[in-house]
Image (cartoon, rainbow, N blue to C red):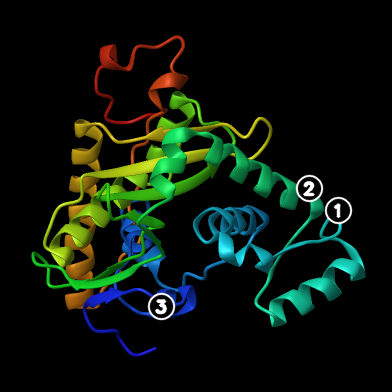
């Protein structure tokens, strides 16, 4: 698709958004966690987890479109599923196994029982705004698509499904999936493009099984700054790669590797002298 002009788009489809070549947070997270080579040839793959998250987003953020979520058979096996899936795809509907369908709407009910969640998700709110912008520092054309913007509170809401919304599990997910990078990138693009700073970026973590607990999180200052630096570094790497048209992968050398700190049970790595060679 042709590149969209910088601006805020309120009715852009998700397919139009993803097909545009502007740099998104997924590209930056890939560079930060892997290499520039990994961003080429990436294909958005649908999965059971992807479908569940998409259905929950639809039911919570755009409830008037909930009839697009279809309750299917108990599992994805057999002709009964495949024929219904083909029919739903043709109608732009989202087919879920019966158990997942029930879980989605039970999770939605749990979210709106939380008074703070309900207040932030209702009122003067707008889901799925697409923003395209020319980044001031790098000149890169970038894009973001917040799950929800609350105009009154001036905050962005990002919904995440999870197995556990306990703080230790959420902290690990934020690190593993680069959510701090996403947070920093969204704030950078939003603040520059809209000409004002948002007052908050909140993660809603929703468990996918009973009791479908929900918890709201905001990065502390240190975590946000780490996400900001990782985001900025990834943007500068992308800019250099694009200018040179070189997209390097992992180093083509032998690299020393260390166990993660939690794996050391008998040895204190800080007390081991440097070893030049191991025979």
Asked if disc 2 and disc 1 are in contact, CB closer than 8 Å, the reply is yes
**Which of the two discs, 2 and 3, labels the residue nearer the N terminus?**
3
Label 3 element class: loop
Residue position marked by numbered label 3 in the rendering: 12
Residue nearest the viewer, comparing 34 with 46? 46
**Which of the two discs, 1 and 3, labels the residue nearer the N terminus?**
3
For the C terminus, the quadrant is top left
Left or right, 76 with respect to 199, comes to: right
Q: Kindly indicate the quadrant of the structure image that contains residue 193.
A: bottom left
Left or right, 187 with respect to 1, comes to: left
Residue position marked by numbered label 2 in the rendering: 99
Q: Where is residue 236 in the image (x, y as percent from the top left)?
A: 16, 61
Q: Where is residue 192 in the image (x, y as percent from the top left)?
A: 13, 62
Mark 2 and mark 3: Cα distance apart in space: 31 Å
Residue nearest the viewer, comparing 91 with 270? 91
Q: Height in image: 41 above or below 223?
A: below
**Which of the two discs, 2 and 1, labels the residue nearer the N terminus?**
1
Identify the disc placed on residue 74: 1
Q: Kindly indicate the quadrant of the structure image that contains residue 2.
A: bottom left
For the N terminus, the quadrant is bottom left
């Amino acid at each position: 698709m042709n590149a969209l002009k910088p601006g805020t788009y309120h009715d852009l489809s998700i397919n139009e958004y993803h097909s545009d070549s502007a740099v998104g947070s997924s590209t930056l997270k890939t560079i930060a966690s892997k290499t520039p080579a990994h961003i080429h040839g990436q294909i958005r793959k649908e999965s059971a987890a992807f479908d569940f998250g998409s259905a929950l987003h639809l039911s919570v953020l755009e409830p008037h479109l909930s009839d697009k979520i279809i309750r299917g058979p108990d599992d994805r096996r057999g002709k009964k599923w495949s024929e219904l899936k083909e029919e739903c795809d043709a109608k732009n509907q989202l087919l879920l196994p019966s158990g997942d369908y029930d879980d989605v709407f039970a999770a939605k009910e749990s979210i709106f029982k939380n008074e703070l969640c309900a207040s932030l998700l209702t009122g003067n709110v707008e889901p799925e705004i697409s923003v395209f912008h020319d980044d001031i520092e790098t000149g890169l054309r970038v894009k973001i698509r917040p799950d929800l913007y609350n105009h009154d509170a001036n905050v962005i809401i990002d919904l995440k499904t999870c197995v556990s919304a306990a703080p230790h599990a959420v902290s690990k997910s934020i690190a593993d999936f680069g959510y701090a990078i996403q947070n920093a990138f969204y704030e950078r693009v939003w603040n520059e493009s809209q000409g004002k700073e948002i007052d908050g970026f909140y993660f809603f973590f929703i468990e996918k099984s009973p009791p479908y607990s929900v918890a709201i999180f905001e990065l502390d200052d240190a975590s946000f700054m780490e996400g900001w630096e990782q985001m900025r570094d990834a943007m500068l790497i992308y800019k250099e790669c694009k200018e040179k048209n070189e997209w390097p992968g992992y180093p083509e050398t032998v690299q020393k590797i260390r166990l993660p700190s939690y794996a050391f049970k008998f040895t204190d790595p800080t007390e081991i002298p440097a070893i030049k060679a191991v025979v």
